[in-house]
């Protein structure tokens, strides 16, 4: 007889993204609108330093600052790092350098990309200039990148070495808000313990693991007891029913979630489990959900996990039965 092969550990691509809309104050609005108009703005602090990109509060004194000035589209590389393999949505599709550039007239550096044929063409102290994007919308991407600059011909705007000129920050059709895109793509592996947990859910079962030392049953399992520091390999089927320990009423509709508000999300201590997991409560008016409510899972056809939990009709659990799981 041959021993059974261990189950294959799951792996799957996972995308975590959180785009959000933020409004802009007068300083950031002027800076981004200026980029759209090929104008580079900074802000002057009380001690005369020029900060680019501009901030609304002095990083040293925390005082509010509003005095805008225009700086040049040329500058000097203060430090750099070569990017051999650009990722999607980075400024350039071909290898380039990430550079910190102190623009002429500024006292702080701006981070952006430098288009260069190779790392041997990049050095600290080299002169560069802005390459503007063909289409500009009022975003940092209006600077397509920086490029090496050795031409002594004066650039449009403030000249190198000239004092930054005051600017009122007034433009037609100013940019007042932006959508900040945050996204992370990676391959996720839940590991041995959670793979077994997910496989059991596909069979409409909930499986945890018991610590051999303190005997607490972890659901979902973690592969090790965080309290005792020992591996957990003894699988224990829990539930299917459980008890609501705590809950919250959700009044804001989530994007792409087809559930009408208000609804209830709760911590549920499944029978036999040493930890509460969370799930949505259905089959009962939201204002009738309570601590101690006995619930059971509701599975949809083909679902890989319970769609929600509904009341079992049993009497409420006594507080002492679940107080340690709150």
Image (spheres, rainbow, N blue to C red):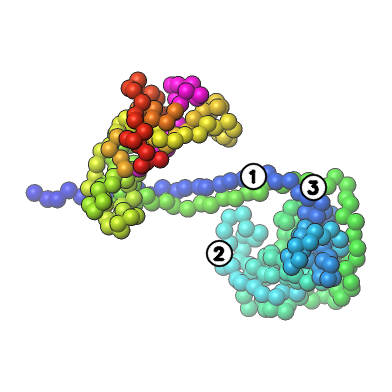
Circle 3 Cα neighbour tier, 10 Å, few/some/many (<14 / 14–19 / ≥20):
many
Asked if residue 292 is among those painted magenta in the image, a careful observer would answer no
Residue 185 at what x, y percent from top left?
A: 51, 51
Q: Is residue 134 above or below residue 52?
A: above
Marked residue nearer the N-terminal end (2 or 1): 1
Query: What stretch of residues is rendered in magenta?
Result: 275-289
Q: Which residue in the rendered view is the most extreme toward the left?
A: 1
The foreground one among 163 and 48 is: 48
Residue 146 at what x, y percent from top left?
A: 73, 66
Asked if residue 287 is among those painted magenta in the image, a careful observer would answer yes
Left or right position of 14 against 222: right
Indicate which label's residue lies in the foreground, 3 or 2. 3
Mark 1, residue position: 20
Indicate which label's residue lies in the foreground, 2 or 1. 1
Marked residue nearer the N-terminal end (3 or 2): 2
Pointers 3 and 2 in contact (CB under 8 A)? no
Number of the label disc, if any, that sits on residue 157:
none
The foreground one among 308 and 21 is: 308
Left or right position of 186 against 200: right
Name the element at disc 2: loop
Residue drawn at point x = 50 percent, y = 24 percent: 286
Residue drawn at point x = 39 percent, y = 25 percent: 310
Number of the label disc, if any, that sits on residue 85:
2
Label 2 and label 1: CA atoms lie apart by 28 Å
Pointers 2 and 1 in contact (CB under 8 A)? no
Number of the label disc, if any, that sits on residue 175:
3
Residue 261 at what x, y percent from top left?
A: 56, 27
Asked if one can make out residue 202 in the rendered structure from this viewpoint, the answer is: no
Residue 212 at what x, y percent from top left?
A: 22, 52
Label 1 and label 3: CA atoms lie apart by 16 Å
Asked if one can make out residue 267 in the rendered structure from this viewpoint, the answer is: yes
């Amino acid at each position: 007889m041959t021993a059974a092969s261990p189950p294959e550990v799951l792996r799957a691509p996972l995308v975590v993204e959180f785009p959000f809309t933020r409004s802009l104050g007068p300083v950031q609005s002027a800076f981004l609108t200026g980029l759209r108009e090929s104008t580079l703005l900074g802000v002057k602090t009380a001690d005369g330093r020029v900060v680019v990109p501009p901030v609304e509060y002095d990083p040293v004194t925390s005082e509010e600052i509003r005095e805008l000035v225009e700086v040049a589209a040329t500058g000097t590389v203060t430090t750099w790092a070569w990017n051999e393999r650009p990722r999607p949505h980075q400024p350039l599709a071909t290898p380039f350098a990430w550079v910190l550039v102190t623009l002429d007239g500024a006292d702080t550096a701006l981070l952006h990309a430098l288009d260069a044929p190779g790392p041997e063409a990049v050095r600290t102290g080299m002169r560069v200039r802005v390459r503007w994007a063909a289409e500009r919308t009022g975003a940092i991407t209006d600077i397509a990148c920086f490029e090496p600059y050795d031409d002594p011909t004066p650039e449009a705007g403030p000249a190198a070495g000239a004092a930054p000129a005051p600017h009122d920050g007034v433009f037609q059709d100013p940019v007042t808000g932006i959508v900040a895109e945050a996204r992370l793509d990676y391959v996720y592996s839940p590991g041995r313990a959670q793979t077994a947990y997910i496989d059991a859910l596909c069979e409409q079962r909930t499986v945890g693991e018991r610590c051999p030392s303190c005997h607490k049953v972890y659901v979902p399992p973690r592969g090790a007891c965080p309290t005792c520091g020992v591996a957990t390999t003894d699988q224990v089927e829990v539930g299917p029913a459980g008890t609501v320990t705590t809950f919250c009423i959700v009044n804001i509709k989530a994007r792409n979630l087809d559930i009408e508000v208000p609804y209830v999300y709760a911590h549920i201590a499944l029978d036999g489990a040493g930890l509460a997991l969370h799930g949505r409560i259905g089959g009962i008016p939201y204002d009738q959900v309570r601590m101690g409510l006995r619930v059971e899972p509701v599975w949809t056809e083909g679902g890989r996990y319970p769609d929600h939990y509904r009341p079992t009709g049993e009497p409420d659990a006594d507080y002492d039965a679940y107080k340690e799981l709150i």
